[in-house]
Amino acid sequence: MPTITVAGSSYDCTDEETVLDALSRHGVKVPNSCRKGACHSCMMRVMDGPVPAKAQAGLKENFVHEGYFLACQCQPDGDLTLASPNGAAAFQQATVVFAEPLADTVQRVILRPETALRYRAGQFVNLRRPDGLIRSYSLASLPDSVPEFEIHVKRLEGGAVSNWICDTLKPGSNVEIGAPMGTCFYLPARDPQNMLLIGTGTGLAPLFGIARDALLSGHQGDIHFYHGSRTREGLYFHHSLRDMHAAHGNFHYHPCVSGQDVPDDCIAGRADDIALQDSGDLAGWRVFLCGLPDMVHATRKQAYLKGASLADIHADAFELAARDEESATERTAATG
Ligand SMILES: Cc1cc2nc3c(=O)[nH]c(=O)nc-3n(C[C@H](O)[C@H](O)[C@H](O)COP(=O)(O)OP(=O)(O)OC[C@H]3O[C@@H](n4cnc5c(N)ncnc54)[C@H](O)[C@@H]3O)c2cc1C
């Protein structure tokens, strides 16, 4: 049975447990949220001992080199000595400079961090509520000369943090944010590679940044952007994306409405179904998928079966926070 040593104390870890499970069982607080390897909020750093490759999947190269790993994905093969939790995800204060609805249930929030973020369009940040609840939000903005960055938050029924953001954060409010994370971003291509972007709901946010980044970088291949929502109102950047479609010969916007009342300028059906029907062989394409986890996981598989290589499929599934005892307690304390 491996032993995990943190800050001079040692804890046993059963063969079935992850580092996060074991430390939580022993009462060691490690920030966490989705527990599925998506939000990266449980990132820790190994000082000594072997970390399985799975625990570093999806981390930026520099994090891997420095020994960071995801505690929720790490079932240790041997004894580990770890740096104290929190060291990796250093949080800083950010001030809200703009907060307005984009649609009935989507809030646009623009924040100015104390220290400008270094990020790539499409990455996400973890936002920490004062009571410690952490949630991830993707960056819709481009890293340019201004320090402000933008997120789009969908209000979820009963959702602890999304409702707090929509109802409480106003210009002047302060929040804590972590360092930009994730590998769902654009890198300039040598060849004119075609790109397929599929997003549902606020899955638009990272894709909007990625598409603009590609266009600004002079991307030569075709860029097909599918945004899906149940209602036309949910296609909350319809006009901006239509303008991009008109302005760039290689940018193609496909607005998809899966509910009733489909306007003439939208396509009836789910964005993922329509995108996969429209596309032929995806060999050589770059694919970006963001939004509802079921859509992202199923479409990743379909894109692979249609010929896209796994290395060319970039995805952020908007996983919900795990419903574990600790989160439940925090949620009750936070909303009660
Ligand atoms: C990498 C990443 C990027 C993301 N980017 C964005 C983004 O740009 N915009 C955005 O709006 N969201 C994004 N999310 C989702 C976001 O992090 C939050 O999960 C979301 O805002 C809901 O948080 P909440 O606290 O409001 O809801 P919660 O309080 O966590 O729960 C929401 C609702 O779901 C129910 N629920 C809770 N847990 C579960 C579960 N495990 N299974 C089923 N139901 C459950 C709750 O009872 C509640 O009704 C992203 C997530 C990830 C991992």
Image: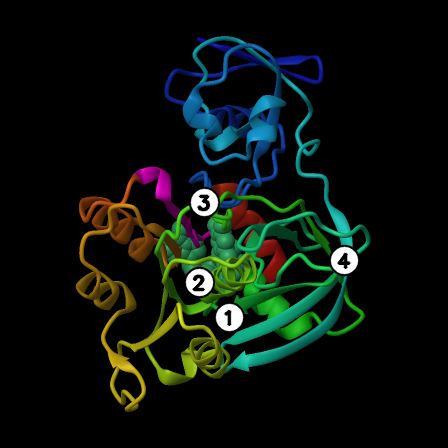
| N-terminal-most mark, 4 or 2 | 4
Say if 228 sits above or below 260 in the image.
Answer: above
Amino acid type, callout 2: Gly
Q: Which mark is residue 155?
A: 1
Q: Which element carries disc 3, helix, strand or loop? A: loop
Three-letter code, disc 3:
Arg
Q: Which residue does the numbered mark 3 point to in the structure image?
A: 190
Between the residue at mark 4 and the residue at mark 2, the CA separation in whole angstroms equals 23 Å
Beta carbon at label 2 within 8 Å of ligand 1: yes
Is residue 81 highlighted in magenta? no
SS type, badge 4: strand
- Local secondary structure at mark 2: helix
336 displayed left or right of 18: right
Tag in front: 4 or 2: 2
* Kind of residue at disc 1: Arg
Magenta stretch in the rendered image: 310-321
State the SS at label 1.
loop
- Cβ of mark 3 under 8 A from ligand 1: no
Q: What residue sits right under mark 4 in the picture?
A: 94
Is 135 placed left or right of 305 in the picture? right
Quote the CA–CA distance across marks 2 and 1: 13 Å
- Badge 2 local density, few (<14 within 10 Å), some, or many (20+)? many
Residue receiving disc 2: 203
Q: Amino acid at mark 4?
A: Ala
Q: CA distance from mark 4 to mark 1?
A: 21 Å
In the rendered image, is residue 159 in sight? no
The answer to whether residue 13 is seen in the rendering is yes
Circle 4 Cα neighbour tier, 10 Å, few/some/many (<14 / 14–19 / ≥20): many
Determine the image quadrant of residue 254.
bottom left
